[in-house]
Image (cartoon, helix red, strand yellow):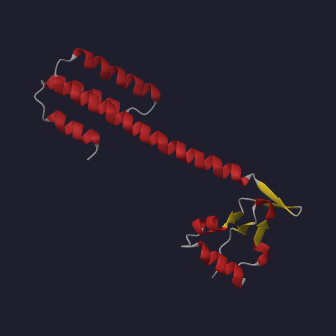
Amino acid sequence: MKNYEKLSKNFNNSNIFAHQKHTIMELIENLMKANSPSELETAIKACTDYLEKTTFAKEKAQIKAAIVAKTEAIIKESVETRQKAEQFLSDFQQKEVVIEVNGKKYPLEEWVTIKGYCNRFNLASTSIVTNWMKRGIIPQENILNIKQLNNIKLIKAVPYMG
């Protein structure tokens, strides 16, 4: 059950006068429905103004719980949005990166490490890819050995049948 639904249930079970219930319910609903920063600011201000006026402890607890629930939801959403944006930016920037080996340029979006290959194609172990390299399943032209990076091997990121 969502925090908002819990608040509504607790609210409906309270012994507050009907017109006050409606006001508190409207405050909480407006707070929970607020999407933009200005809507949120307006809703929180209305809630805090009401908190200053009310003398009922249960009302204060309900409004405070609603504010906490909404702000926690916003924080969680913003963290998720930031992570998605960082991943998008990273993916975008990686597409622009090339590595030059023996005078030939290779776009890094097409080449991955052995571990990166395993992650991309859901393979259980790097030993699978290493074995494919030894057996020739991955053609030599699809393997880059970067001596400048401690002999790290990059593999062309295409599916191979092992």
Q: Is residue 111 left or right of residue 54?
A: right
At x 45%, y 25%, the residue is 38
In the depicted structure, whether residue 117 falls above or below residue 66: below
17, 71: nearer the viewer: 71
At x 18%, y 23%, the residue is 20
In the depicted structure, whether residue 34 falls above or below residue 90: above
Quadrant the C terminus occupies: bottom right
**Residue 150 image position (x, y, % from top left):** 75, 62
**Residue 43 image position (x, y, % from top left):** 36, 25
Q: Is residue 66 left or right of residue 102?
A: left
Give the residue at the far top of this rendering: 53
Instruction: Place residue 52 in its image quadrant.
Output: top left
135, 7: nearer the viewer: 135
Task: Kindly tell me whether residue 137 is visible in this rendering.
Answer: no
At x 13%, y 25%, the residue is 18
Instruction: Place residue 153 in its image quadrant.
Output: bottom right
Give the residue at the far front of this rendering: 150
